[in-house]
Every structure is written in structure tokens, then in C-alpha cells.
Image: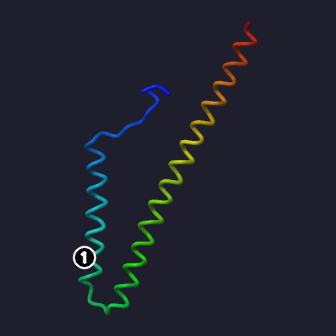
């Protein structure tokens, strides 16, 4: 794998993503805490929010892994095709 094949994000983008995630979690927690409802309703919303965050992270990781796996399979297939063409041309 060459350096050109690797994808990287700028430090500014990574900072933005992490900050946005932290702020959204803080806003969600503050909204639940200051909501005029009883403790059972707040607890239910907190559990649902945690489940939503964890399933979102799992979904994005799974989709990224599938994409990376597909890229690897395409590279292997391309290398095999190039080898066959090279052998045929000889």
C-alpha cells in the first residue's frame, strides 16, 4: 500500500468531529436533566440516547469495514487481472 492509497483527515476536521460529538452528548444530557419530567421518564430517555449513540457508532464502523473490505477485494482482483494480462502478453 502506498502513501497515495491511504486516506487521512486533516487535524482540523478530526477536531471538529470530536468537538461536535462531545457537544451533542453534553446538549443531550443537559436536555434530559433539565426536562420537566419525573426520574423514570428521564432515565428512559437517557438509556434510549445511550443505545442510539452506541448503535450509531457500531453502524458507522461496520459500514467503514465493509467499504475497506470491498476496496481490498477490488485491489486483489485487479492484481490478478494484471498478472493474467502480463502472462498472456508474454
Q: Residue shown at 60%/30% (left/top)?
A: 75
Relative to 77, residue 57 above or below? below
**Colour scheme of the picture:** rainbow
In this rendering, is residue 16 above or below 29?
A: above
Which residue lies most toward the front here?
1
Quadrant of the image occupied by residue 70: top right
Residue at 30% across, 54% down? 18
Q: Badge 1: few (under 14), some or many (20 or more) residues near its Cα, within 10 Å? A: few
Q: Quadrant of the C terminus?
A: top right
In this view, the residue farthest toward the right is: 88
Q: Quadrant of residue 28?
A: bottom left
Query: Where does label 1 land, which residue?
Result: 30
Q: Position of residue 38 (x, y in %)?
A: 32, 93
| Left/right of residue 38 with respect to residue 85 in the rendered view | left
Q: Residue furthest bottom?
A: 38
Where's residue 64, x and y in %? 50, 48
Q: Position of residue 76 (x, y in %)?
A: 64, 30
The structure residue drawn at horizontal position 38% and vertical position 37%, both measured from the top left corner, is 8
Image position of 47 with respect to 39: above or below: above
Horizontal side of 63 relative to 49 (left or right) equals right
Tell me the residue at 47%/29% (across/down): 5
Q: Is 69 on the left-hand or right-hand side of 26? A: right
In the image, residue 27 lies at what x, y percent?
26, 70
Q: Up-down: is 45 above or below 24?
A: below
Total marks placed: 1
For numbered disc 1, what is the local secondary structure? helix
Amino acid at each position: 500500500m502506498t502513501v497515495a492509497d491511504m486516506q487521512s483527515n486533516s487535524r482540523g476536521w478530526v477536531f471538529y468531529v470530536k468537538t461536535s460529538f462531545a457537544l451533542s452528548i453534553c446538549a443531550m444530557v443537559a436536555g434530559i436533566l433539565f426536562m420537566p419530567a419525573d426520574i423514570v421518564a428521564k432515565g428512559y430517555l437517557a438509556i434510549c440516547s445511550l443505545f442510539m449513540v452506541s448503535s450509531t457508532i457500531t453502524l458507522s464502523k461496520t459500514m467503514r469495514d465493509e467499504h475497506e473490505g470491498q476496496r481490498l477485494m477490488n485491489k486483489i482482483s485487479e492484481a490478478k487481472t494484471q498478472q493474467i494480462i502480463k502472462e498472456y502478453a508474454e
